[in-house]
Image: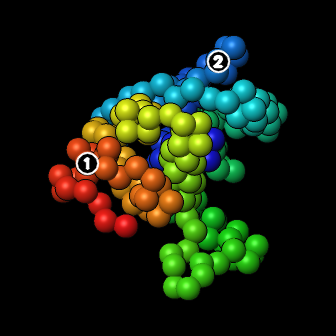
Amino acid sequence: MSTGLRVGEASAYRSIMSNWRLIRPKSHILETKFHKSRIVPLHPSTAERLRHYQAQRARLHYDGLSEAFFVSEQGQYLQHRALHDWFARLCQRLAIAPTDGARAPCLTSFRHTFAVTRMQCWYQQGLDVPSLLPHLSVYLGHVHPQESYWYLTAVPELLKRRCPPIRGLCPSGGTPHA
């Protein structure tokens, strides 16, 4: 949840894509969806956890098996389907289930939570969210700010707060309805 990466971006992550030793650590996300690349700033605590994982990886001699950063026990890239299956089993074991016919949690939920939480923080700070939405869009790797718009519609609290100033971001060109 701390980076907003897509599941595929995280599973395709390679060791060479990071610079965690900086005062402001960052990761380079290369040639992802729509062949876009971007730099993703990391919170220092996230960079520290990644450094710890990297050390564990080296200790277990996985670092020489492939370019993959997050590896299977065979040292290969983690498969998208395997990650989703693992997460579903984990949720089941922890008794995390949807309520009232809602969708089950999935790994993509972390990305959605990241985006929604960022916007909620901006509103709480009294910032101009419509003007910041293009920055969030770039951070998430969206081609157009309109692609980030639907995060607002996923959370009624956000949808009610500032719909009028966001008219131009609505994919249909209109104003969303609460």
Q: Position of residue 173 (x, y in %)?
A: 17, 52
For badge 1, the amino acid type reads Arg
On the picture, is 173 further left or further right than 167?
Answer: left
Q: Which mark is residue 96?
A: none
- Up-down: is 7 above or below 34? below
Q: Residues within 10 Å of mark 1 (few under 14, many from 20)?
A: some
Q: Residue furthest left?
A: 173
Q: Residue at x 23, y 53 (%)?
A: 171
The residue wearing badge 1 is 167
Judged from the image, the secondary structure of the residue bearing numbered disc 2 is loop
Disc 2 or disc 1, which is closer to the eye?
1
Query: Could you tell me which residue is drawn at 25 percent across and 48 percent down?
Result: 167
- Mark 2 = which residue? 24
Disc 2 vs disc 1: Cβ atoms closer than 8 Å?
no
Q: Amino acid at mark 2?
A: Arg
The quarter of the picture where residue 145 lies is top left
